[in-house]
Image: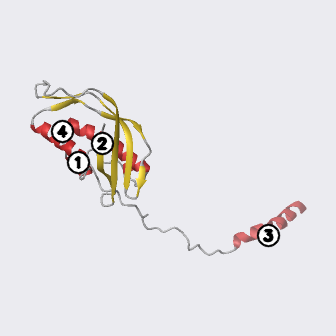
Amino acid sequence: MRASVIALLVAAPFLGGCTETHQASTALPSTSAAVTTESLPTVGPADFPVPDEARTKDAAGAEAFLRYYIELSNRQQERLDGQPLRDLGPHCQECLRIAQNFDEVAAASQKYEGGKITINGLATPLLQDDKAVISFGARQEAVRLVDQAGDPVDDGLPLLPHQSSGITLVWSPEANCWLVQGLNIG
């Protein structure tokens, strides 16, 4: 019994705090809905939009945009629709020329066989203010233009495995995205 009394006396200072009244904290989290960031407006074709990682104003975003634009170009060559290239390169003369070629081939009921472009080397993007310049190596598969029957319309081009290429991008704050200002494949 003596041990119980001693234990109770030792524990009393610690247990005493349990009977005190404490004021509720006024620094509790708000019960209102969390603030969310606005989603980026869609840029590019609705079924193949510019991905979010290509919409950051930094070297990684510029590189991601270049990769996206090359894939978009390959996709539009199969679909023969130049408008997405115009939309993302409205001041790029080479982009506008390629887009016009796609539209003319479609109007003539012709199509391309081959010609896929892949990136096979890439330098670190050079950024200055709202501009990014990227040098890259490109491989273009052999390509030829054929008519509806599949007969060649021209001599085509052979495989071009190592083309020194470059792209100049400008940041568009309205689209929150890079746009092509200049493009050179080969």
- How many residues crowd mark 3 within 10 Å: few (<14), some (14–19), many (20+)? few
What residue is shown at x 14% (from left), y 25% (from top)? 152
The disc, 2 or 4, on the residue closer to the chain's N-terminal end is: 4
Q: Earlier in the sequence, mark 1 or mark 4?
A: 4
Q: Amino acid at mark 3?
A: Pro
Could you say whether the residue bearing mark 2 is in a helix, strand or loop?
strand
Does the residue at mark 2 contact the one at mark 1 (Cβ under 8 Å)?
Answer: no
Q: Amino acid at mark 1?
A: Gln
Q: Which residue is mark 1?
A: 93
Residue 13: which numbered mark, if any? Answer: 3
How many residues crowd around disc 1 within 10 Å: few (fewer than 14), some, or many (20 or more)?
some
Label at residue 184: 2
Q: Is residue 17 above or below residue 80?
A: below
The reply to whether residue 84 is visible in this rendering is no
Give the SS element for disc 1: helix
On residue 80, the disc is: 4
- State the image quarter where residue 101 is shown: top left
Q: CA distance from mark 3 to mark 1?
A: 83 Å
User: Spatial distance from mark 2 to mark 1, Cα to Cα?
Assistant: 10 Å
Q: Residue at x 38, y 43 (%)?
A: 135
Give how far apart the Cα atoms at labels 3 and 2 are. Answer: 81 Å
Mark 2 packing: few (<14 Cα in 10 Å), some, or many (20+)? some
> What type is the residue that disc 4 sits on?
Leu
Q: Quadrant of residue 100?
A: top left
